[in-house]
Amino acid sequence: AKGTATETSDLDLFYIPDGGDALAPLASVVVDGLPYDFWPVSWQMAEEIADARSPRPWAVAASLVADARMLFARSDEDRSRFEGLQRRVRELTEPGSRRTMVQRAITAFPHVTAALGQMRRAAEQGDEAGIGWAGRKAVEGCLNCLALANQTYFSKGWGANFAEAGALAKRPPDLIELIERVLLPSDDAGPVGAAEQLAAGVRIMLQEERDATSVPAAAAEVFRDFYHYVHEYVAKVGAACERGDVLAAGYAAAMLEEQVAQLLHLCGAGYLPTEFDLAGEYRAEYLGAGLPRLHELAAAGDLAALAAAVRAFDRRMRDWLTHRDIDLRVFDGADELRAFLRARYRD
């Protein structure tokens, strides 16, 4: 399709089945020494790839849609639909989609941490093959995050894209060296340490990109109709403390602190923390609001101190919200609720 085929190239043909039936026909054959792959791709899969939401890594999957040459369309509508997917890939490579693609990269990063965990477990068991396989997954995950953050994709498969990776504008400075240390380990440079260093470099770069593209959110929007959650979990913590249930009290307290800390960080830093983030990295706004350290009290198992702290939490949270003219939505009886609803929805 690109005019760049060599003697060792394979031919990949895919089709989008009518009605979304992606089960058959499917044929992978070798003819005259060359491999041919004919396989179904559902509309859903194609759309997820085009929008960088597919389980298949964007770094190599995007080319499947963006660079495909359409040989046949069963209707003008289908042709237009697929061309729309190709336009979507192009949109995600344009400056206006920078924030979206950085967020896609951050969402994909847990695949890297999972691979690192597998590497560590394999290393503990002396499983060299396991280390190597998980190391390749860690490298692939890092390259996928970098491709997303750079708003680009690789035109070739994983084994042939290192030159493209080394040319990325945003990347750890020692990217290729670290990849080589993971995939071609020497006696004095362990692959696990190299993979951890690679992942750390990619994570720092993603944090910097997110900070550069984030816009603080308005507290009035973030915490609108939120106080009921505070009231509910304050009650859960109090009730668990009264019955001496340390686990339940601690869990509810941690949930309350975590939810409020994340939303306050959204107001201050402009993004909602995810599995990518460590709790200690987004607690500044929470502590700055003067809210109690519920998690630490819960971990200590001091239920009397926790019960007092959660009551203080409720008071300070109410003050914080009302100081910003955020209605708590607290009513004395059904008549007040009816009046509120009539006023809110009178239009």
Image (tube, rainbow, N blue to C red):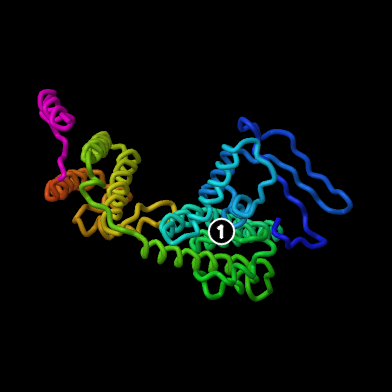
- Quadrant of the rendered image containing residue 27: top right
Q: Position of residue 131 (x, y in %)?
A: 66, 60
User: Residue at (30%, 53%) from the top-left corner?
Assistant: 266
Tell me the kind of residue under disc 1: Asn
Q: Position of residue 163 (x, y in %)?
A: 64, 70
- Side of 6 where 266 appears, left or right: left
User: Residue at (15%, 29%) from the top-left corner?
Assistant: 346
- Side of 264 where 154 appears, left or right: right
User: Is residue 301 at least partly visible in the picture?
Assistant: no
Q: Give the range drawn in magenta.
A: 326-347
Above or below, 224 against 287 in this view is above
User: Is residue 224 at least partly visible in the picture?
Assistant: yes
Q: What element carries label 1?
A: helix
- Side of 241 where 100 appears, left or right: right
Q: Residue furthest front?
A: 76
Q: Is residue 3 magenta?
A: no
Circle 1 sits on which residue?
144
- Quadrant of the rendered image containing residue 208: bottom left
Could you say which is closer to the camera, residue 66 or residue 109? 66
- Side of 327 where 260 appears, left or right: right
Q: Residue furthest top?
A: 334
Q: Quarter of the image containing the N terminus?
A: bottom right
Above or below, 163 against 50 in this view is below
User: Residue at (15%, 41%) from the top-left corner?
Assistant: 327
Could you say which is closer to the camera, residue 297 or residue 23? 23
Q: Quarter of the image containing the C terminus?
A: top left
Could you say which is closer to the camera, residue 160 or residue 2? 2
User: Residue at (27%, 48%) from the top-left corner?
Assistant: 260
Q: Position of residue 93 (x, y in %)?
A: 50, 59
Q: How many marks?
A: 1
